[in-house]
Amino acid sequence: MALDRRSILGLSAGGIAGVAMPTPGRATPMPLGSLGLDVTHFGVNAGSPDDQSAALQRAIDASAEARVPLWLPAGTYIASDLVLPSGAQIYGIRGATRLLLGNGASIVASARADQVTLQGLVFDGRREFLPKDRGLISLRHTRGVRILDCYVQESGSDGIFLEGVEGEIAHTTVIGAANAGIRSIDARGLIVTQNTILNTGNGGILIWRQHAGDDGTQVLANRIENVEARAGGTGENGNGVNVFRAANVLVADNRIRNCAFSAVRGNSASNLQARGNAVTNVGEVAIFSEFSFEGAVIANNVVDGAAIGVSITNLYEYGGRLAVCQGNIVRNVMRTGTGEDWEARGIGIHAEADTAVTGNVVENAEAIGIRVGFGVGLRDVSVTGNVVRVCPIGIAVSVAPGAGAAMVANNLIADAAKGAVLGMEWYKTVTGDLARGTENRYAQVTVSGNRVR
């Protein structure tokens, strides 16, 4: 049996020491292997058509009490509603040890446990119905969680459901979850890294809180593809990474492709950082910071194929404000409807309040390269040092009555057929090209130093 270096180090630090010192006072010696407990000593039979839950639970409890690993040989085990106590460590042979959902709400679950490890296991839900707020793996108020090198497939709800969890999910593949691949509520220190999330019904990775507050989850270097929005809605479903009410979340270096709505969507998510993500082919806004947020950094992402590349919005209704949008490449942003209204889209970058838009490259946006505010939704936006190419309108600035201040300076704008910098009242163009010397009647808007070609 091949073990990776991390497993060997962990076992040498804890598991082997546990084997050398069995639980004092136990009348019958425990069936210890060289690296922990062998599940077959508890009457568990791989490949049996019978439900193995009772025997597996005895083995899990015994290994957790002794603080030693529990080993499951290759094969299929039918089980459900297995309870993971503190200290549970369950290991399988990667891709070959398969836990098949029986007649229950989850395969494994925990509540108020500490130091729980699942590694090298396949969790197969057979697309059986699961209750709300359950996954094939359901962990609540659990610390020291490690889910490593697992496969979670065909869940009838979430693949992995977490509430109040601290720990790490890494190198795990979630395929075919009917709802979300990984859903976390009220995390207490979570890292979700280098996982693969494929073919989910309503979401890829969801980082939510019941009430707005600090979260700090890190979503790093995952691959997320083919996210649908089967439950409908106007954006609450269909997102690769959805951050809701959770502050100080980092979403970085992910590869996100084919999402019904957004690749990264922050809703009321203050201090969100979306950095270095590669996004292709999403149906709405590729990277979205919306509603009542304060603080967002959207930097160094590549967006190729969306209805809007980046949107930083909702000043007027909800007070969304304060952002940096820097160093992104946004290209091939296409309309999804007809007409000139907002719903038609085709906008590279949209920003509304207290925001610096700098050093981005926008190419081939079907309507507007960079839109600065919309109607009265504009306050203190700086647009400097960007390159905007092959967009009918290079940069559009709201000059509607009640709109705030904007500065558009030192940008390079090429092949903007309708105008390089235009003032707009809602959907209507009301100025000539301000970058070509047209008289600027709006004192709140500064346009200077732009290069037009």
Image (cartoon, rainbow, N blue to C red):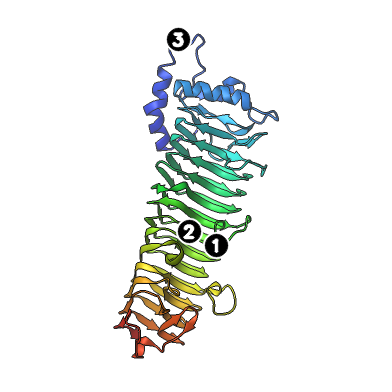
Label ID, residue 265 = 2
Element type where label 1 sits in the image: loop
Rate crowding at label 1 as few (under 14), some (14 to 19) or many (20 or more) other CA atoms within 10 Å: many
Residue 404: percent from the left, percent from the top?
36, 74
Q: Residue at x 37, y 58 (%)?
A: 294
Left or right, 79 with respect to 28, comes to: right
Above-or-below relation of 349 to 231 = below
Residue 141: percent from the left, percent from the top?
47, 35
Residue where numbered disc 1 is placed: 261
Whether residue 312 is visible to the viewer of this picture, yes or no, is no
Above-or-below relation of 386 to 64 = below
Q: In which quarter of the image is the C terminus?
A: bottom left
Q: Residue at x 52, y 46 (%)?
A: 183
Q: Residue at x 44, y 56 (%)?
A: 268
Tell me the kind of residue under disc 3. Answer: Gly
Left or right, 101 with respect to 204, comes to: right
**Cα distance, mark 2 to mark 3?**
55 Å
For the residues bearing labels 2 and 3, Cβ distance under 8 angstroms: no
- Tag 3 or tag 1, which sits nearer the N-term? 3
Residue nearer the viewer, 294 or 184: 294
Element type where label 2 sits in the image: strand
Residue 410: percent from the left, percent from the top?
30, 79
Residue nearer the viewer, 115 or 343: 343
The residue sitting at the right extreme is 49
Quadrant for residue 425, please give it.
bottom left
The residue sitting at the front extreme is 402
Residue where numbered disc 3 is placed: 25
- Tag 3 or tag 2, which sits nearer the N-term? 3
**Cα distance, mark 1 to mark 3?**
59 Å
For the residues bearing labels 2 and 1, Cβ distance under 8 angstroms: yes
Tell me the kind of residue under disc 2. Answer: Arg
